[in-house]
Every structure is written in structure tokens, then in C-alpha cells.
Image (cartoon, rainbow, N blue to C red):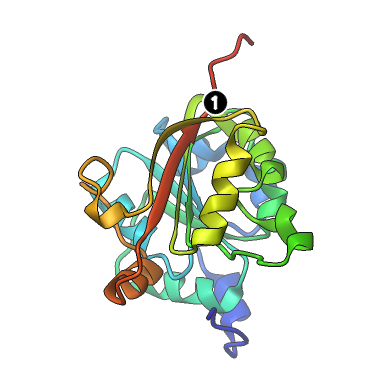
Amino acid sequence: MRLKNIAGSREVIADSRFVIHEPQNQKGKWQDLFGNKNPIQIEIGMGKGRFLMELAAGNPDINYIGIEKYSSVLLRAVQKMEENELPNLRFIRMDAEDLCEVFDKEEVDKIYLNFSDPWPKDRHAKRRLPSRQFLARYDRILSADGRVEFKTDNEGLFDFALLEVEPAGWKMEASTRDLHHDKKLFPGNIMTEYEKKFSSLGNPIYKYIIYREKREN
């Protein structure tokens, strides 16, 4: 369950220099914010930040942006950054539906979706982060050779995600229904808080990597 209503979380986030408070003003200028020309990768629904912080620490030549909707969850990531600041990582508190208002065409090189809300009711399908509606948003902001990497422990959500790929105009690069026993995809895997919890219970972890065919501009 996500944390909710932690007293003072919004105030801490509002004062944090690690959070970009008007991200729409950075559209097309994210590299300027980091002060370099390094590629930009984002995680949508970053939770408490474990995954991105480990990525950023191990890849100083890549800029990372974590997107989280809930203040009480983002608060934990901010607190971690206060203890161990990473110059190539920043956060945004926003709804993922606003991605195209914040990132310009081809401004992002990779998108991570980790243990997203499954939105189990059929009428909420378009809210699922691997839905064709969201894949259309990713298409607008990803570089020509960009990738989306999706992990979940929810088999129903994974089945849904697989069915969305082709109709949305994407191609499958790799997929597995048991990531932690997959000799190709598991090496280098970084676990999120949820992944550590679910895998410790014996739950299989599902993953795919998708891309779009290169198109003429």
C-alpha cells in the first residue's frame, strides 16, 4: 500500500531543492538544468526512490528524473537524497498524464515503469501506465531509439501490457515471466522496494522491454 497523508510532506517537498516545482518550464531544457548534455532517463511512479538512486549512483553520465504523484511517498525519496545527494537525479511531483507538458519531443532516452498501479477495473484500463494511451505519450517524448522497460508482479497487468504493445505501434525487444531466473534479463537488475518484498515471498517478476521502429522524420 502507498503511504498517504503524512503530516508536513507537502511542505517538505515544496522546500526541497531536489524537487522541480514548475517542471513545465523545463520542457526542452532538461539538459540545461543538469548542466550537461548527458542522456535523460525517467521513472514514472518512482515510489521511495531506491531504484533510481541506485541507477544514478552507478551511472553518473546519465541524468535521471523520478516522477511520483503522491507527496507522502516522494517524501521518502527526498529524505534519502538529503542523506546522500546525487547530482544527476531530480524529482517531480505530478500526474503521469501530464508528461507531454513537461518533456519535449525526443527529450527522453528511456522510461522505467516499475510495479505500477494495476487499476484492475476494466473502465480504468486507460489509466494503466502500459496502456496504449500512455504508450502514445511515451512515443512523443522518447528519442528515436528509446526504450520502455516495464516490471510488475501482477500477471493480469502484464498480460494486458503485452496485448497493448502491437496495437500501439511498438515492438517487443525482450520479455520474461520470471525475471529473477532469466539468464538474459536478470544480470544487472536493480530491485525496487516492491520487487524485493514480492520476490522474497516467492512471487515471479514479469518484465518487458519495448521500442518503436525507426521512422523517417
Image coordinates for residue 166, horizontal then vertical, percent: 60, 32
Q: Is residue 27 above or below residue 71?
A: above
Quadrant for the C terminus, please: top right
Q: Is residue 68 above or below residue 143?
A: below
Q: Residues within 10 Å of mark 1 (few under 14, many from 20)?
A: many
**Residue 186 or residue 103, whichever sits in front:** 186
* Residue holding disc 1: 212
Q: Residue at x 73, y 53 (%)?
A: 126
Image coordinates for residue 17, horizontal then vertical, percent: 50, 63
Q: Residue furthest top?
A: 216
Image coordinates for residue 169, horizontal then vertical, percent: 63, 28
**Residue 167 or residue 71, whichever sits in front:** 167
Q: Residue at x 24, y 40 (%)?
A: 184
**Residue 123 or residue 6, whichever sits in front:** 123
Q: Is residue 5 above or below residue 43?
A: below
Q: Is residue 80 visible?
A: yes
**Residue 135 location, quadrant:** top right
Element under label 1? loop
Image coordinates for residue 203, horizontal then vertical, percent: 35, 69
Q: Is residue 123 left or right of residue 30?
A: right
Number of marks drawn: 1
The three-letter amino acid code for the residue at tag 1 is Arg
Q: Residue at x 54, y 51 (%)?
A: 159
